[in-house]
Image (cartoon, grey):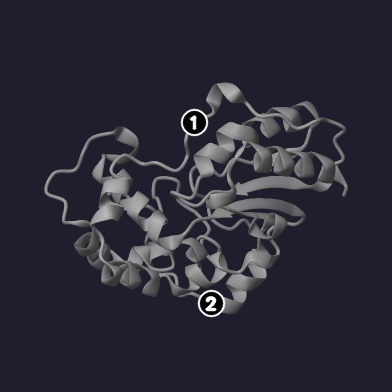
Amino acid sequence: MDKLNKTFYHLQIAKCGGTYINNMFVHSLFNIFNENSIKYIDGEYHLGWQEIEKIYTLSCFRDPLKRTISHYAYYKNGGHEGKPVDGLPNFIDWVKENKNLLENYQVKNFLYTKKNFNLNPFNPTSGMDPDFMSIKVDKNKVMNRVKNTNILLKNSQLNDSTCLNVMQKILNDFGLNKKSFIDKHKKYDHNITIGSKEIYDTLSIKDMDYIYSINDFDSEIYMSDSLFFNDGK
């Protein structure tokens, strides 16, 4: 790989462990890339697919039910600003109200490219990007882009060992003679958004089946272990 002609990109999907990945090793990679004049794109603001020649893409999927619950809990807790939302419907009613946003949410990130940084593909009541809302899922295009993703992780894989191995692979792929490490000062539990477990515990089998049904393609990809780093193990 010609490291000088490659651009690293973390395609960060909301509520799929992206902040954890950033804190564990991606931000450390950015520092190394800066030292070696390697280009990178910071995907922290959910930029979607980047159609750039010779791009090296990392991304992460999550169990669709858990991701949707976390999306709701994050929004209910006030999101980035931390101001709790009053009068919010219960989880299932909220999902039904925002079905167009939430269905197959993860694969739509592979069909979306942010053009306006004042908009977002996440908050249904503030600054929602109409480009994201208008996406029609093209399964062939999604599968092609997923397969062209250099490293695809499952949220369930995220631990010290996997992060070290993935960082080392990226360093090796960019021809950098460095040993991987984890930023222990930024380590924290990536799987818990306040209130998520309590919401999960209230759901019936019917409720869970509904969430999976509107995320059928997300579920299909999530269950396809061969698409993931180390076969999803």
Amino acid type at circle 2 is: Asp
**Residue 7 coordinates in the image, percent (x, y):** 73, 46
Please tell me in which quadrant of the rendered image residue 206 appears.
bottom left
The residue nearer to you, when weighing 158 against 170, is 158
* Residue count near mark 2 (Cα–Cα under 10 Å), binned few <14, some 14–19, many ≥20: few
Q: 149 above or below 14?
A: below
* Residue at image mark 1: 188
Question: From this viewpoint, is residue 215 visible?
Answer: yes
Give the residue drawn at x 61%, y 46%: 10
- Can you say which quadrant of the picture contains the C terminus? bottom right
Q: 8 above or below 62?
A: above
In contact (CB < 8 Å): disc 1 and disc 2: no
* Residue at image mark 2: 138
The residue nearer to you, when weighing 62 against 44, is 62
Image side of residue 89 versus residue 165, left or right: left
Give the residue drawn at x 48%, y 61%: 106
**Residue 11 coordinates in the image, percent (x, y):** 58, 51
Disc number lying in front (1 or 2): 1
What's the distance in space between the residues labelled 1 and 2, CA to CA? 36 Å
Image side of residue 122 versus residue 109, left or right: left
Image side of residue 115 versus residue 53, left or right: left
Give the residue drawn at x 36%, y 41%: 193
**Residue 199 coordinates in the image, percent (x, y):** 26, 52
Earlier-in-chain disc, 1 versus 2 = 2
Label 2 sits on a secondary structure element that is loop
Q: 82 above or below 132?
A: above
**Residue 65 coordinates in the image, percent (x, y):** 39, 61
